[in-house]
Amino acid sequence: MIAFILRRIAQAIAVLLTVSLIAFSLFRFVGDPVNQMVGQDTTVEQRAAIRQELGLNDPIALQFGRFVWKAAQFDFGISYLNKQKVSKLIAERFPATMELALVSALFALFAGIPMGVYAGLRPHSWLTKLFQTVSLVGISLPTFLIGILLIFIFPVTLGVLKSFGRQGVVDLGWWSTSFLTVAGWSSIILPAITLGLFQMTLIMRLVRSEMMEVLRTDYIKFARARGLTSRAINFGHALKNTMIPVITITGLQIGSIIAFAIITETVFQWPGMGLMFLQAVQTVDIPIMSAYLLLVATLFVLINLIVDLLYVAVDPRIRISGRPA
């Protein structure tokens, strides 16, 4: 197990170095950093001094090594727009995005898996047809349109739940949370459903197809012949064997939730990293864009590592080498 973890960590470091090279290229070659930091009245001598101070005259390899070293210490420089440390800005927005992603993922799992199991066990019931219709809507409609529809139905028409912002926030030292107040939950429910609806649909359809496939296998027929109860067969044998692809998709989708929360955060004006990244793109704030790229890549790598470990835990047929037995 230790060798497996070390091998996966080495692969993760290689991926992060590749992403760091892309982020460094974005930082170094998309526009002139000095021009972004100074005004038009800055003299040529002052520009040259700033360039020397930033180390932009050093060899590219040295600049890249310094960029990676600082990134490893969570130092991404100063934001062009806010004139503050990028690490400080990210730390302020990080709790909002993580809480939104957590609620979205839990919504997708706790709604998608039961719906998929029911649809797999009773493929011809009216409730299954309703689930499939909902899943079709969830896949077909774009995220921003779902958000606008939810805002129109709940805050505008029914007068319940919040339509924008992160309200009822409580500071807990280094973390700010909206989980401790009613206003906080009222403001997070709609963006969480909007963000998690596609993932819920995906999980539901995946569980349904896997359950139907597993229930046709020989070992399930043998279990029925042995006289096992339907509960034991469906939930003790069939559901367990459907979990491997579900774990894979769920892990990757959690990364997607964090990375692609930009649209949802924009529609609901949720003050997370996605909204900050969009504002950085609009103002060509390269340090924030580079930091966001690296942070998202790190989250994806960590999630993939956790998924690989869960593979081994769930299915003993998978060897530590990562190849099926």
Image (tube, rainbow, N blue to C red):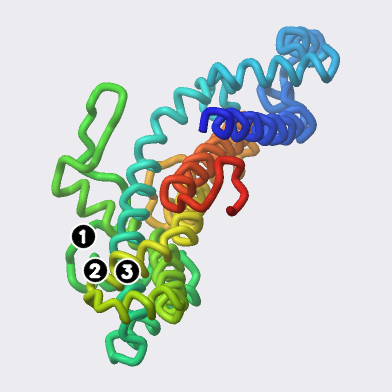
Q: Amino acid at mark 1?
A: Leu
Q: Nearer the viewer, residue 145 or 201?
A: 201
Splitting the image into 4 quarters, where does residue 75 fall? top right
Splitting the image into 4 quarters, where does residue 51 fall? top right
Q: Is residue 217 left or right of residue 62?
A: left
Q: Which mark is residue 154?
A: 2
Q: Which mark is residue 161?
A: 1
Instruction: Report, in whole angstroms, how far the alpha carbon at label 3 lies from the one at label 2.
Output: 6 Å
Q: Amino acid at mark 3?
A: Leu
Residues at discs 3 and 2 in contact (Cβ within 8 Å):
yes
Q: Secondary structure at mark 2?
A: helix
Question: Percent position (x, y) of residue 316?
Answer: 46, 50
Tag 2: Cα neighbours inside 10 Å, few (<14), some, or many (≥20)?
some
Instruction: Report, in whole angstroms, how far the alpha carbon at label 2 lies from the one at label 1.
Output: 6 Å
> In percent of the image, x 25 and y 74: which residue is there?
228
Residues at discs 2 and 1 in contact (Cβ within 8 Å):
yes
Question: Percent position (x, y) of residue 267?
Answer: 42, 57
Which of the marked residues, 1 or 3, is nearer the chain's N terminus?
A: 3
Tag 3: Cα neighbours inside 10 Å, few (<14), some, or many (≥20)?
some
Instruction: Report, in whole angstroms, how far the alpha carbon at label 1 lies from the one at label 3.
Output: 10 Å
Relative vertical location of residue 71 with respect to residue 197 in this rendering, above or below: above
Q: Amino acid at mark 2?
A: Phe
Q: Nearer the viewer, residue 82 or 137?
A: 137
Question: Percent position (x, y) of residue 253?
Answer: 48, 55
